[in-house]
Each structure stands twice: as structure tokens, then as C-alpha cells.
Image (cartoon, rainbow, N blue to C red):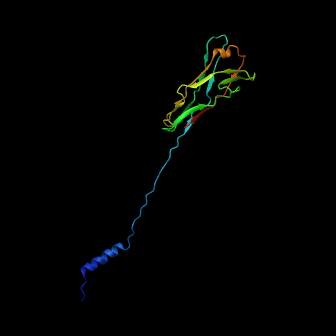
Amino acid sequence: MKVLNPYSLSSLLVVSMFSGATMAASDLINVSATVKGTCQFNTTGTTVSFSLDPSSTADVTGTVINPPQFWCTKGTVYSIGDDGGLQPNGVPYEMEHNTLLGETLPYTFSYVDDGTGTGTGKSGAINITINSTVANSAFVDASVGDYNDWVTLTINP
């Protein structure tokens, strides 16, 4: 009778236990995102209106209806600019008479906050405060009727 070596038997068992097993592998996956700096207006249809009475001796400040409001991505530095209006005579901020072409009324147009800042995110709306005035000397001899101009605001992130 042949006697088995106990050490060879245990080696055989260990080899047979692991011979059907597989080894796991892994991979590291990079996940990334970029949040873009952007600005968007929340409002449309802002109007600055003046009621000009030539018998007055005072300058007239415009009434701002539906002031412009916007938001910028948090941390985005923005600046607000404008095109100076339609400029019928090449001069920024002139309203032109609706029917008497060439007849204009100059006015001032500015932003209280100087038009620069840093965004705080979509839920942090920013109001633009506009100041606009027509000097008394500009309208005391003006023709009766309606005058208009269109100023385009732009926000640059």
C-alpha cells in the first residue's frame, strides 16, 4: 500500500480551489464639468418716459418703467454697455421727432452702479438703475409732438 504525502495533497487542494477563480480588474474614470460664465436679461420692455412742459424752468428726469434686470453666473465679472441710441445726428442720446425728421431732443443716459460688477448666480438678480434727464434748455423751444430713441443695452461677461 502506497502512503500519500499530506503536503502534496494540501497543495493539490489549494491549486484546485483557485484554478477556476478569476481576478477582478479596475479602471479610474475622470468625471469633469465646466460651468460657463454667462449673463442673461430677466426683463424686456424697459421704457424711460419724459413729460416735457416748455413753460417749466426745470430739467426733467425720466421715469423708468420696468427697469432692466439680469443675472450672471456666480463669479462672472460683467460690464454693461450701450450703443448710444439711434444717433440721428451722430450724437449719442438724442430723441428724434416722430414726424419732423431731423428735429431732435438731447438727453443724458447713465447707470447708477457704473455698469460693472460680479454675478452671484441665476437666483441673484441684478437691477440696473438708469438715470436719464432732458435739460430745460433742450425742450423750451422744441416742436410739439412725440420724440423717440432706442438704446440697446449689452452685458458682457
Task: Left or right? Give the position of 30 relative to 142.
Answer: left
- Quarter of the view holding residue 48: top right
Quadrant of the snapshot with the N terminus:
bottom left
Task: Left or right? Give the position of 10 relative to 86.
Answer: left
Q: Residue at x 50, y 46 (%)?
A: 34
On screen, residue 35 above or below 46: below
Q: Is residue 43 visible?
A: no
Q: In the orientation shown, which residue stands out farthest toward the right?
A: 100
Task: Left or right? Give the position of 13 relative to 81.
Answer: left
Q: Nearer the viewer, residue 80 or 26?
A: 80
Task: Left or right? Give the position of 31 relative to 50.
Answer: left
Q: Is residue 8 visible?
A: yes
On screen, residue 25 above or below 64: below
Quadrant of the snapshot with the C terminus:
top right
Q: Nearer the viewer, residue 126 or 82?
A: 82
Q: Nearer the viewer, residue 92 or 39?
A: 92
Q: Residue at x 65, y 14 (%)?
A: 137
Q: In the orientation shown, which residue stands out farthest toward the bottom?
A: 1
Q: Residue at x 25, y 78 (%)?
A: 7
The image shows residue 23 at horizontal and vertical percentages of 39, 67
- Quarter of the view holding residue 65: top right
Q: Nearer the viewer, residue 33 or 2?
A: 33
The image shows residue 154 at horizontal and vertical percentages of 60, 34
On screen, residue 83 above or below 19: above
Q: In the orientation shown, which residue stands out farthest toward the front?
A: 90
The number of numbered badges drawn on the structure is 0
- Quarter of the view holding residue 98: top right
The image shows residue 26 at horizontal and vertical percentages of 42, 61
